[in-house]
Amino acid sequence: MFNQLKNDDSILKNLRADCENCFGLCCVALPFAKSADFAFDKDGGTPCSNLQSDYRCGIHENLRAKGYRGCTVYECFGAGQKVSQVTYDGNDWRDNPASAKEMFDVFPIMQQLHEMLCYLNEALNLEDAQPLHRELQAAFEDTEYLTKQSPQSIMDLNVPAHRTIVNDLLLRTSELVRAKVSFKKKKNQKKQNKIGRGSDLICAKLRGADLRGVNLRGALLIASDLREADMRVTDLIGADFRDADLSGADLTGCFFITQAQINSAKGDMKTKLPLSLSIPAHWR
Ligand code: SF4
């Protein structure tokens, strides 16, 4: 079963945003507060004034320059096209205003389910997680099943309870993968105690730091200096990289990192990324 997932482009395609097949759901369903990331206050369920009738963004090429940086770092993990084309079978909210609110309520739940699918799929492709593949496969299939339910069933889901099951598996996956550099933990025990899961590393000076094998799950790395840092085999799930400087850093082999996290950071052409991610335009 594992081999069916491995290198399956159709799975990866379904777990990445396909704006061409989405009814602009992130630009309508989600609320935004005026900030450095978004230029004005917008209520959930209200279309952004920059959203065009064809569901394209009217300022797509200039989002950062116009004060919409948050839009460049948002990731729906394919939830937009799933809700638009599967849950609602291609019936958009403009033509079906009676179901619009329901669609906007379903979207953020679907986004969470697709995020879990994305991480589970990555875990299934990590050779070091082989002992967990059966459980990971079952969790992937269970989660995918949930995404195919009716709108009401999706809204009735206990997402936190399902996330707890998935998180436990991802944590065990992380331990298996990072075990190959576990010698680092002993060698740098003192340092490891300060840098790890959920650490507050805002503005931390970590230039050239050896972070191989560290669990940085949920760490706050906002505006930190990570130039030339070594983050190979590092768990970066949910780490907040906003304005962190990754210039020259090596992230090859790190795992559970998304393109949205990379897009929120600074970097340069010397930054080494996992093959599945690409250098953001604003790093060039
Ligand atoms: S600025 Fe563009 S991408 Fe951002 S919410 Fe509005 S339409 Fe969507």
Image (cartoon, rainbow, N blue to C red):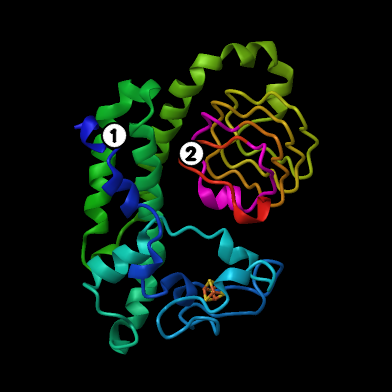
Q: Quadrant of residue 246?
A: top right
- Ligand 1's quadrant is bottom right
Element carrying mark 1: loop
Q: Nearer the viewer, residue 56 or 156?
A: 56
In the image, taking residue 254 as reference, residue 172 lies left or right, namely left
Query: Amino acid under label 2?
Result: Phe
**Residue 260 in magenta stretch:** yes
Q: Nearer the viewer, mark 2 or mark 1?
A: 1
Pinpoint residue 273: horizontal percent, then vertical percent. 56, 37
Q: Measuring 53% from the left and 60% from the top, which residue is drawn there?
A: 74
Query: Amino acid under label 1?
Result: Lys
Pinpoint residue 251: horizontal percent, then vertical percent. 59, 33
Q: Earlier in the sequence, mark 2 or mark 1?
A: 1
Residue that carries the numbered disc 2 in the rendered image:
256
For the N terminus, give its image quadrant.
Answer: top left
- Circle 2/circle 1 CB separation < 8 Å: no
* Prevalent SS, magenta region: loop
Residue that carries the numbered disc 1 in the rendered image:
6
Q: Which segment did they paint magenta? A: 251-271
Q: Quadrant of residue 111?
A: bottom left
Q: Measuring 71% from the left and 67% from the top, which residue is drawn there?
A: 36
Picture layout, residue 134 above or below residue 142: above
Pinpoint residue 283: horizontal percent, then vertical percent. 67, 50
Q: Measuring 27% from the left and 41% from the top, which residue is drawn there?
A: 8
Q: Nearer the viewer, residue 166 or 228?
A: 228
Q: Quadrant of residue 209?
A: top right
